[in-house]
Amino acid sequence: MKKIKSILIANRGEIAIRISETAKKMGIKTYGIKTPKEPGAYYLQFMDEIIDFTEAISDIPEFLDIDRIIYSIKEFNIDAVHPGYGYLAENPYFAQKCIDEKITFIGPSPDSIYKLGNKTIAKQLASRHNIPLLEGSDGNIKNTKHAKLLAQKIGYPVILKAASGGGGRGMRIVESEDSIEKMFRMAQNESEKAFADPSVFMEKYVRNPRHIEFQILADHHGNIIHLGERECSIQRKHQKLIEEAPSIALNDELREKMGESAINIARASNYRNAGTVEFLLDESGNFYFMEMNTRIQVEHPVTEMVTGLDLIEWQIRIAQEEKLTIKQKDVKIEGWAIECRINAEDVQSGFSPFLGTVEKISITNGKNCRFDTGVAEGSNVTSNFDSMLAKLICYGETREKAISNSLSALSKLQIQGIKTTIPFCKAVLNHPKFIKGDISTSFIVKDMKQLFHQEQDEEMIAAFWAALNYNVQLDIEDETYVDYEKGKNMTPWLMNKRLKSL
Amino acid sequence: MDPNGKIYKDFLNRIERFKIQNGPEKIKKQHDKGKLHARERIALLFDKDSFEELDAFVTSATPDTGLGKIDEAFGDGVVIGHGQINGRLVYIYSQDFNVMGGSLGAVHAKKIIKVQDLALRVGAPIIGLMDSGGARIQEGVASLSGYTSIFHRNIQSSGVIPQISVILGPAAGGAVYSPALTDFVFMAKKTSYMFLTGPDVVKEVLNEDVSFEELGGAEVHARKSGVANFIYEDEENALLGVKKLLSFFPSNNLENPPYVETSTNKDKNAESPGTIVPDDPNKPYDVKKVIELIVDQDSFFESSEQFAPNIVTGFARLNGIAIGIVANQPKVLAGVIDINSSVKGARFIRFCDAFNIPILTLEDVPGFLPGLDQEHNGIIKHGAKLLFAFSEATVPKITVILRKAYGGAFCVMNSKNIGGDYSYAWPTAEIAVMGPEGAVSILHKKELQNAEDPKKLRKEFAAKYRQEIANPYIADEKGYIDEVIDPANTRKKLISAFKTLENKHIEQPARKHGNMPL
Amino acid sequence: MMFSKSKKNKQKFIACTGNNKKYEFVNPKELSIKQGKENLPVEIIQDKQGFVYIVWKKKKYQVDVIEKNQNQYEIMVNGVSYPISIESPFSYKRRKYLAENVEESKVEKIHAPMPGKIVEFLVEENQVVKEGETLLILEAMKMQNEIISNIHGKINKINFQAEDNVMKDDILIEVER
């Protein structure tokens, strides 16, 4: 296959910038899409060429408008498209359309995307290749009676999930047989509403599991390696907030076992390019395959930091059918990396999205610290897009050092105008259980008493600052000189006319 | 005079009695209810040692009417006088709840009338601090007569001197009309009430349970009735607010508003107010942010903030000169004009006009609020008030069209044809007879009916309409506006434009008064 | 008793926090905070980018006024926000008296100001909202309108979902004080 000379980045924010940086390094020309929702966006500054989508021509959001994107790629004669994450990254139809139009899609084949994107098919695939799975329904549940029987077989608690779902919607945990019928119907309804597909499946529910995922690279020549694991157990409502690599819960033996399973599932689906295999790890060290994400992940930088590899570069190289030059034995995990997601969310008000303008931002870039940001001073945060503004990734030789480096970077990272998850990240990193590594996906709900970090005397400092501001305001108003005399001086013209008219 | 003799002792005794009447015990009585004493309020308002009291020692005219004993306290429940606020003469009356609940009897009324007459005679602002149980029943018709005389003077002074009412306790029945006749009403939250008929009567007549706060508290009057222009958490901040408001007003209708030197130079590297307006014409934004970027720093003082928030009214300074601002608020109901916002805007404009305060209009209005409710309640005549007020005002009037200016709303919002002196538009302005959606339905009715994908076609037509018809350049080229300006230059432009209008005067036809559609 | 106007006098400010804790400051403009019997100095610094810091007891705090309305402030310290109301000794007493003696209706109902379609809710049930905070976006007359909260409080109930059509005066959200 020919070398890629130009890429359309069909995404926005930090990932668009991230992709453009690697592309630039590789001498590839980048094209970005300008949308009417944020025509002055920061990521556009990093593109070689900008394609203007500001004029609305349909109701489809710009980054999901397959026809328009394909048309633009042809129009500008662009070689390849990188979808980033979200949007069209896991859309098999788009990937197929690219192939039809002879455009290089930087990602896996439409077939892999389709198979791995459907949880039921993915599980069947895994079970055929003896990859450990949570016990569950083999396929979708037919009716309430079926649900009851299955739950009896698996044993409570069980979880019901939408077959086409994700992001926690359509999920129901059932603790006992009393509520199985009701919950099944609710899950179906929710699933129908959210995804226009009422199919629901069931599996064993694991208490306090860890979220462990393996980064995979696979080329077109049958080589598949894994780049070790990431732990993403710090989640709120299935949204990851802090990720790290490697995981404190894995020893070499377990790592090898899980890595092998990850490679197996990739092989079974004839996978190419970068992907991530997600597992649940229970308290006794059993792991279960959850799903495979067929895209670059938000949290990929922690893997990059501990392996020294550029994953975007490998995505592009694999897409132009280069051979993987790294063998599994060459992959060395060194040190520790932690990523904190900086979201525009008001932690004190239930993580509600916070909209506004980034008035000021002080960026911390250091030796052990990488700041991938999608915003800069003056950027607007609107409800059009998700709330992630930036990611702070810090490195240390040990986990302790990575934590302390993260904390010191977080304390230097200041954002004015927008409330962010910085105080939340500080609270997690200061938490004794997190420091010990004693975490699970229910950490936030179960172990955190306060969701944001407060320094000693912080409230008093706030009170003082308010009192001082008020005091100064009072003095200004008290000392303001109001010049009433000036109002009495007017030209004879005006004075005369005014007198006459009264 | 013998310092130990009876004559001097009598004199001292009288002063002693006066001191006790206003002593710590009485002050504590007010404090225990969360309120300040009538004299403390005056002390907070006036420059140090500048207050001169009048008629401190008068007592009630009819100590016993047979309806019960009347307190023979000095002053008869109201403190009157004059003093300086920021170095300027202001008259005041402050009701003392400690004396017969601040009730209004003949002498009490006479004292208020006295300061009202004095203020009008010398052309100075007057402030009333109300804390009164209402008419003094024991004095019968004499107190009603007193009220009426006060109302009459309120009306005589209207438009001649600024009148401010501050409600710091109850104001019931007839007592509410004096504040209603004045220019601005302040209220303190939770300790002040205004209503014509109290909760007891409501209960009796309608059998509805309603609390003082729900019936006539500060929040109700700020948000629902619009009676209160300014409300505060406490009395001290309320009185500070009164001082601040006065700093925008001249002493009378012959003078120009005062000048305040601006300490900060905003003309350098300021953010352009244009950045606040989103590109998407259907997206809301906060027009107050635009105002803040145009006027002198921290000078904007909003009036009637919570009532009809779809229009913003308030005072500000532009290079030290006081101006009044009327702005559509796209953040609330898209800035549409309805009954309440018309009335709110009209009253504000008329105040500015009466006291020579130039008016700046910031326009972003999609039109009038449609619907049965509005039409049946008379949006026609209420909207006409706004039109009347803008058209009638002879002070300098400048409009900046920020975004939408459609149809009748464009005419009403101080267009050049009703006497606007200058009319500017930002490049984001859309000026046309109607909005794109409506216009497309009429202009392209046939095409849309026959279209395969009418939704898509409609969008295309709307975009075309926006670009070709609803832009500011056509109005500019035809002279309906003066200039399309760069938003970044708005402040500079306005300062120099208002400067050229300093000497503006318009001859009015001789008449008693116009007939505003009330 | 009240905020005195003479600069010679001691000016005492009482800062009340959201959870009704109070801090007292005498003449804050002298830039010191009392701890025990000692007055410890406060330093205010501004960095090149314009971020403002308070240094007290050798510790640095980034501070910012997010909002102010009369005597009500929202202060951000190190990214955490604190609602603070500044009272004089008298208004503090008044506040306490009113809290004990004047009852307020607990639930504020937010009505639809006009018929329209709900675009999205920006809040969830049980979320704490501030006065003036946008609760939802209602589309009517082809315009998106922000529906804002009149009070500080907690979202008690949300009666509709995104995409629902509502009539004028429908109760959209109930906020509890």
Image (cartoon, coloured by chain):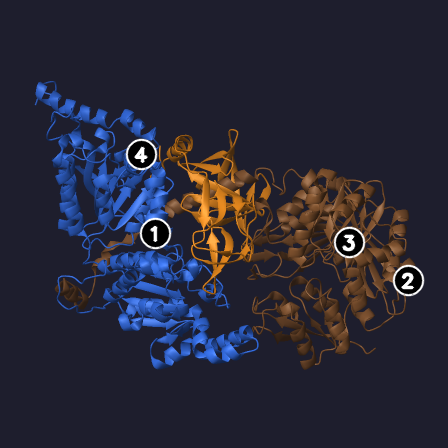
Figure check: A307 above or below C43:
below
In 3D space, how far apart are the residues under numbered discs 3 and 1 (Cα atoms)?
Answer: 60 Å
Eye-nearest disc, 2 or 3: 3
Give a yes or no on whether discs 3 and 1 share a subunit: no
- For the residues beneath circles 4 and 3, the answer to whether they share a chain is no
Read off the residue under disc 2: A327
Which is in the foreground here, disc 4 or disc 3? 3
Above or below, A226 relative to B108: below
**Kind of residue at badge 4:** Leu
Residue under label 4, please give it: B36
* Callout 2: chain: A
Label 1: which residue?
B304
Q: Quick check: B144 above or below C139?
A: above
Q: Chain of mark 3?
A: A
Judged by depth in the image, the label closer to the viewer, 2 or 1, is: 1
Q: Are marks 4 and 3 in contact (CB under 8 Å)?
A: no
Q: Which chain is orange?
A: C
Determine if residue A176 is in view: no
Disc 4/disc 3 C-alpha distance (Å): 72 Å
The alpha-carbon separation of the residues under discs 4 and 1 comes to: 25 Å
Q: Amino acid at mark 1?
A: Ser
Q: Nearer the viewer, residue A99 or B484?
A: A99
User: Taking A271 as reference, is A79 left or right?
Assistant: left
For label 3, the residue is: A140
Colour in which chain B is drawn: blue
